[in-house]
């Protein structure tokens, strides 16, 4: 009884901290550590002074004494403080944080670009320019959010990816070094030993890794997660030949353009709910783009969601399985094409047209090891930008929509438009509105799933109007105002309960 009482007090303290600040005070952090509270996984990291190791709050090693703990906003801050990652709880697997306010969203958008290599290509100035802000402002808000500079954050991400590859794959050290963003094996070995006080080969041996022949990764999330409903939602909207989904996994073909280089392959994502992990297998051909592919998988499945925050903000009956996740998109152009094809038609009709579109203009997937059912790659915007609209219309698509798709592809190819998570939402919505054939519903749908904007709200959607029992867009917006900033979660929850109604 006494132990139960103590545990309840700890959980209560955790909840209070969770409701008030992004990074709780040290005492609240320690309470979360004692309770192994999954809600705090990825929200902070704990460094242990006696071992110089840092852990996630869910780590199951013996909890250190309070006076031996230091708490950090990010893994990068912990490593800057002289701590190395725990080999048991593996900080590189921790889920990220969603971020709602504008500064937080901007900092996290910068983190995504850094993880994708933008800082390596053009420095902090290039990252800031992509986000429409100054490098000075970016450095300031980035330090507030993560406790480190963008350059320090980038170095930690390279090392954590290398650590993950050493543990989870059979890739040789040279390939790991380049995949993680190091320009030479010598530099990789030197930085790795300096930061972790082990060579890459020593860490691989110490971690007890059993490298798989394929590329297999584990992505953590905060439970609860309603996997059956998420997979059913995706299955109803799959593009035949490009995606294969059943009640236990999601598979898709992948085509990535990185400068002059084109990578083609596939991925398979299998939930492991008993461990709060998503297991992701990649074809070896995607090894050069591992960070980008894993990042896109995280967005597709909304793995950084903080369910407690969403549940508190929505008038939806709480469920043990948790709120419906804000299902994103692996590829923004692909999602936008689905949105345009789905205008004023059923889900079934939309995915029939999308399958024809992929088969007509996408490359065949030539990989004998690919999961059954994956036959084509979805065509990139570079291809569709040069297609005659009449060839698109010949698939049973109206000529107006064919022209809309081509204009959309041209804007993306030119770089004038980017359909990526955490892009400046208002600017993207304005750019989409300039394309004939894209109205408010389609723009909001793209913002919801391609930009992963949690407050997107297609107010003119028929299912939304009927559910809210209103007749006009203005009435719908007024009635949904209490749902902000989580309106997209409310809408996707509604759509998931109405299969076959919304694209």
Image (cartoon, helix red, strand yellow):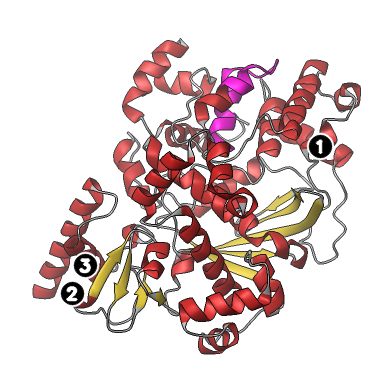
Q: Is disc 1 in contact with disc 2, using a CB cutoff of under 8 Å?
A: no
Q: CA distance from mark 3 to mark 1?
A: 51 Å
Q: Is disc 2 in contact with disc 3, using a CB cutoff of under 8 Å?
A: yes
Q: Name the element at disc 2.
A: helix
Position of 50 relative to 281 (above/below): below
> Percent x, y for residue 315?
32, 33
> Percent x, y for residue 281?
66, 66
- Is residue 449 part of the magenta span, yes or no? yes
The boundaries of the magenta stretch are 430-451
Q: Name the element at disc 1.
A: helix
> Percent x, y for residue 443?
59, 24
Q: Which residue is mark 3?
A: 30
Q: Which residue is mark 1?
A: 382
Say if residue 201 shows up in the picture: yes
Sequence-first tag of 2 and 3:
3
Position of 222 relative to 110 (above/below): below
Sequence-first tag of 3 and 1:
3
Residue located at (83% from left, 33% from top): 384
């Amino acid at each position: 009884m006494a132990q139960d009482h103590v545990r309840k007090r700890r959980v209560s303290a955790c909840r209070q901290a969770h409701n008030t600040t992004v990074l709780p005070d040290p005492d609240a952090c320690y309470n979360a550590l004692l309770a192994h509270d999954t809600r705090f996984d990825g929200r902070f990291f704990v460094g242990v002074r006696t071992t110089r190791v840092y852990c996630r709050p869910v780590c199951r090693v013996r909890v250190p004494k309070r006076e031996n703990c230091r708490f950090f906003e990010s893994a990068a801050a912990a490593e800057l403080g002289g701590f190395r990652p725990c080999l048991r709880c593996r900080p590189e697997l921790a889920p990220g944080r969603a971020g709602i306010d504008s500064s937080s969203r901007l900092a996290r958008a910068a983190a995504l670009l850094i993880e994708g290599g933008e800082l390596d290509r053009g420095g902090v100035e290039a990252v800031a320019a992509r986000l429409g802000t100054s490098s000075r402002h970016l450095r300031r808000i980035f330090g507030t959010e993560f406790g480190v500079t963008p350059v320090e954050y980038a170095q930690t991400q390279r090392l954590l990816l290398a650590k993950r590859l050493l543990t989870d794959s059979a890739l040789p050290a040279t390939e790991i070094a380049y995949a993680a963003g190091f320009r030479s094996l010598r530099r990789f070995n030197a930085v790795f030993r300096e930061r972790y006080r082990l060579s890459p080969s020593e860490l691989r041996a110490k971690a007890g890794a059993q490298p798989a022949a394929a590329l297999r990764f584990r992505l953590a999330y905060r439970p609860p997660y309603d996997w059956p409903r998420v997979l059913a939602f995706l299955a109803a909207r799959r593009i035949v030949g490009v995606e294969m989904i059943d009640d236990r996994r999601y598979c898709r073909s992948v085509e990535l353009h990185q400068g002059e280089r084109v990578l083609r392959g596939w991925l398979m994502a299998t939930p492991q709910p008993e461990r709060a992990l998503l297991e992701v297998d990649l074809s070896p051909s995607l090894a050069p783009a591992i960070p980008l592919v894993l990042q896109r998988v995280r967005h597709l499945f909304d793995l950084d969601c903080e369910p407690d925050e969403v549940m508190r903000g929505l008038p939806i009956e709480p469920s043990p399985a948790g709120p419906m996740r804000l299902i994103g998109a692996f590829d923004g152009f692909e999602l936008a094409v689905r949105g345009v094809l789905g205008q004023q038609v059923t889900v079934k009709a939309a995915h029939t047209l999308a399958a024809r579109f992929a088969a007509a203009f996408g490359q065949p997937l030539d990989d004998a090891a690919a999961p059954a059912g994956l036959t084509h790659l979805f065509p990139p915007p570079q291809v569709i930008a040069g297609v005659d609209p009449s060839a698109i219309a010949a698939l049973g698509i109206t000529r107006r929509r064919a022209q809309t798709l081509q204009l959309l592809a041209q804007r993306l190819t030119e770089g004038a438009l980017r359909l990526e998570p955490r892009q400046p939402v208002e600017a993207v919505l304005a750019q989409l509105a300039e394309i004939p054939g894209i109205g408010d519903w389609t723009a909001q749908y793209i913002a919801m799933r391609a930009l992963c904007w949690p407050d997107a709200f297609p107010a003119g959607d028929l299912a939304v109007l009927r559910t809210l029992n209103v007749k006009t867009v203005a009435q719908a917006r007024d009635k949904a105002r209490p749902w902000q900033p989580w309106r997209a979660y409310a809408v996707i929850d509604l759509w998931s309960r109405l299969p076959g109604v919304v694209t």
